Image: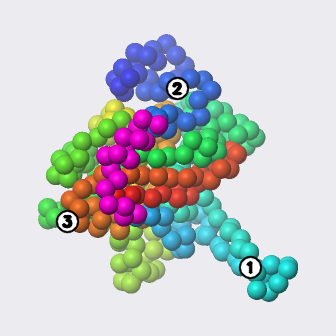
Amino acid sequence: PTLEELKTFNAGKDVPPETAWIWGKDDELGRINLLTAEVTNAAKDNEMMDGQVVPLNWSLRYPEHPSFHRTAFEHKIAPHPISPCIFDDFYDMNTQSGSQWDGFRHFGHLGIQKLYNNLDPQEVQSGTRCGIQAIAQHGIATRGVLLDHYAWAKKHGRPYDPFSGYAIPVSELEQVAKEQGVKFQPGDILLVRSGYVSRYYEMQKENPAKLEDLAHNPSYAGVEQSEEMKTFLHDNYFAAVGGDAPAFEAWPRKTEWYLHEYLLSLWGCLIGEMFDLEELSKACEKRNRWTFFFTSAPFNTPGGIASLANSLAIF
Ligand code: UVW
């Protein structure tokens, strides 16, 4: 159903009108259900061209100062008990602090106080329903689409600061898609490059203190919170959406609601954050082609909230 049709579908039910819990009451995959063997096979046939692999995981050292008061990644190395020439290592990390998927146990609808598919917040602390393990056990392999909004804005003499909170409207995403020659298909992974990672590197040189300040006062470009954006993100039936920015949606938000509420809890659509899209941007530009085969193998953590995406783009 479209977002508009959901309003009729949900009439009289005790859920917001745009709720899309349409895959059955036991469903834990949401839009990942779109990724059938046929969809994966078609993506392989149509997108794999020359074999270049572009990994999309950003260094786990970044961001050095995570937003929203999250603790930074820590990496310890210890010698193995058998010999000082054998090593183990340990991570201490918030799964929100890298190139990651927000899973369905991350963010609920704040009005009805439910997460995806009617999951109670209390259940998040106990069971495993709708945990990231469900996505891990399915896997993600489909067509990816990059909308290189940051490059497009520069090219058209309209550069913006990715740390400015610039809200990217649907009209601009559609112009980027048109100029790149992209037509969306159900089951695509949508990636929007808003320039965060590129600006992060510049800021490391220009003014590193600003990066620490931003972690306390987050401000990032991202997709706009608007009715048009909801329709665009919903009705294109992307299997998941993501980008290089820390929240995918523009921050600070300018609406009462978050897109997180719609994407994760009402529609079952994973959100990818802080993907490193820098090499991908170059690889797409070089080929004049902004679609590719996309894979992701999240952690198989029972009840997990989020996961490193471990994504690859393959041309
Ligand atoms: C928000 O808090 C909106 O973003 P994140 O996914 O980083 O929690």
Placement of 127 over or under 147, stated as above or below: above
Q: Quadrant of residue 225?
A: top left
Secondary structure under tag 3 reads: helix
Determine which residue is flagged by label 2.
23
In front here: 296 or 262? Answer: 296
Q: Give yes or no for contact between labels 1 and 2 (Cβ–Cβ under 8 Å).
A: no
Which one is in front in this view, the residue at disc 1 or the one at disc 3?
1
Residue 134 visible somewhere in the drawing: yes
* Magenta region, residue range: 37-53
Q: Is 290 situated left or right of 197 in this image?
A: left
Q: Is 185 situated left or right of 9 in this image?
A: left
Label 1, label 3: how far apart the Cα atoms are: 46 Å
Q: Is mark 2 within 8 Å of ligand 1?
A: no
Placement of 304 over or under 11, stated as above or below: below
Secondary structure under tag 1 reads: strand
Q: Position of residue 294 (x, y in %)?
A: 42, 52
Q: Amino acid at mark 1?
A: Phe
Placement of 114 over or under 85, stated as above or below: above
Q: Which mark is residue 154?
A: 3
Determine which residue is flagged by label 1.
87
In front here: 250 or 265? Answer: 265
Which one is in front in this view, the residue at disc 2 or the one at disc 3?
2
Magenta stretch contains residue 138: no
Residue beneath the point at 70% across and 77% down: 76
